[in-house]
């Protein structure tokens, strides 16, 4: 044993060996833990990304199908001879028979397509008939009427505040033409306009989530000047449709990135209520709408939280086991050292006893001197 090593310490080679062992154990477990964390995070991220993409794709397909159904039905109405005849009669003046027929048709369509109001509108955009006694049209609709008349095709408006209650919704404007010798496309007779509340039509498509999760949602947004305008109600802003917007330059949220940053597909960042989220954005064909599915990152990785805690516990247990083995080795070393000291002391005392006995029986004087005396 080294003379300069304290009695309560292991020899330097032993200490170095155990320091190396404990260091290697920690290094191995930390490296393995980091690898497991990285792989697990990637796996969860990929799983969440696939879920968000699936939800967004399914909902965007449903929205497109819904829009196509509305336009298809409007085209059928546009080319229905009886409907054109009834509307032509109503726009010229009161006609009880035509009014009764159109109200009956409107009642059927209201039940089938959840329309909140249906109108017959003259070419000067005055109302000839309404299922809700609505006699005025917002001037902002004029562009849609002009588009329908010039294209000879039905037009679906963007999200608007619909009469009679001002709720967010949409309108389908159907131009009706009557054959005329001087116009091969026909003469414009008037319009049929169907209004529908969004909460009865597209909001159930957008806002539904396939799994019960309070931290996940889908929202519909669009650019409005330099703002991101919410077209649907957000989970944490239940009345946000057409009333809540985010400035385009107010930080990088997933909504602003999707609308103004050209981001589509998987997006990660803060959302409108300052929560870190994983999201998937996709534009809706034929509109300026962008559908965003998102889930809070903390919730997405919550399933991994307990595994992470277990991993830390395993590392702690490995470190504890290494320290315990070190202490056991140290204790054995001290036990062996003390045993050797005890045996040496025992041998020394026996030698002293023999020497003393020898001296007691010596017949003459014995002088013992060292080399200096």
Image: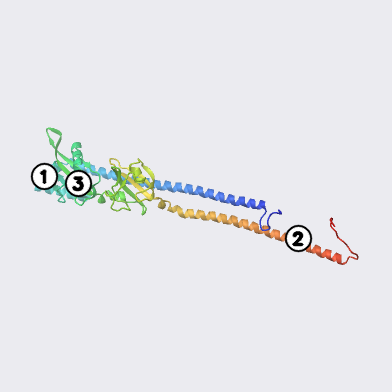
Report how far apart the C-alphas of labels 2 and 3 lie in the structure.
109 Å
The residues tagged by marks 2 and 1 sit, at their Cα atoms, a distance apart of 126 Å
Return the residue at label 3. Answer: 194
Q: Which residue is mark 1?
A: 90
Q: Residues within 10 Å of mark 1 (few under 14, many from 20)?
A: many
Location of the N terminus (image quadrant): bottom right
How does the figure colour the protein chain or chains? Answer: rainbow
Spatial CA distance of label 3 from label 1 is 17 Å
**Residue bearing mark 2:** 344
Of residue 125 and residue 98, the one placed in the foreground of this image is 125
Q: Which residue is pictured at 11% across the width and 44% down the height?
A: 90
Nearer the camera: disc 2 or disc 1: 2
Q: Earlier in the sequence, mark 2 or mark 3?
A: 3
Displayed quadrant of residue 67: top left
**For the residue labelled by badge 2, is the local secondary structure a helix, a strand or a loop?**
helix
Describe the element under mark 1 as helix, strand or loop: helix
Instruction: Say whether disc 2 or disc 1 marks the residue closer to the N-terminus.
Output: 1
Residue 105 location in percent, x, y?
16, 48
Question: Residue at horizontal 63%, vertical 52%?
Answer: 18
């Amino acid at each position: 044993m080294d003379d300069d090593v304290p009695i309560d310490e292991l020899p330097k080679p032993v200490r170095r060996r155990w320091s190396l062992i404990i260091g290697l154990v920690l290094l191995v477990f930390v490296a393995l833990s980091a690898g497991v964390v990285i792989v697990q995070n990637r796996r969860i991220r990929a799983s969440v990304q696939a879920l968000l993409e699936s939800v967004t794709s399914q909902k965007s397909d449903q929205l497109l199908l819904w829009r196509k159904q509305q336009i298809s039905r409007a085209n059928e109405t546009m080319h229905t001879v009886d409907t054109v005849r009834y509307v032509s009669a109503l726009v010229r003046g009161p006609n009880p028979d035509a009014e009764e027929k159109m109200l009956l048709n409107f009642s059927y369509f209201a039940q089938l397509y959840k329309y909140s109001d249906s109108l017959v509108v003259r070419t000067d955009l005055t109302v000839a008939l309404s299922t809700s006694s609505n006699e005025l049209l917002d001037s902002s609709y004029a562009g849609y009427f002009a588009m329908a008349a010039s294209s000879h095709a039905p037009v679906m408006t963007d999200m608007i505040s619909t009469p009679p209650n001002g709720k967010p919704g949409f309108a389908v404007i159907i131009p009706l033409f009557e054959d005329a010798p001087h116009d091969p496309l026909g003469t414009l007779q008037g319009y049929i306009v169907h209004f529908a509340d969004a909460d009865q039509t597209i909001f159930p498509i957008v806002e539904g989530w396939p799994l019960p999760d309070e931290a996940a949602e889908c929202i519909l947004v669009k650019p409005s000047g330099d703002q991101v305008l919410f077209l649907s109600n957000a989970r944490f802003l239940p009345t946000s449709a057409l009333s809540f917007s985010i400035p385009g330059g107010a930080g990088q949220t997933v909504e602003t990135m999707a609308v103004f940053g050209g981001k589509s597909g998987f997006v990660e960042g803060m959302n409108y209520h300052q929560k870190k989220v994983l999201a998937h954005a996709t534009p809706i064909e034929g509109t300026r709408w962008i559908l965003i599915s998102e889930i809070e990152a903390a919730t997405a990785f919550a399933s991994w939280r307990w595994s992470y805690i277990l991993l830390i516990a395993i590392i702690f247990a490995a470190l504890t086991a290494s320290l315990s083995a070190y202490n056991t080795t140290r204790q054995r070393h001290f036990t062996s050292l003390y045993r050797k000291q005890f045996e040496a002391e025992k041998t020394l005392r026996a030698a002293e006893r023999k020497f003393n006995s020898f001296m007691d029986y010596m017949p003459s004087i014995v002088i013992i001197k060292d080399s200096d005396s």
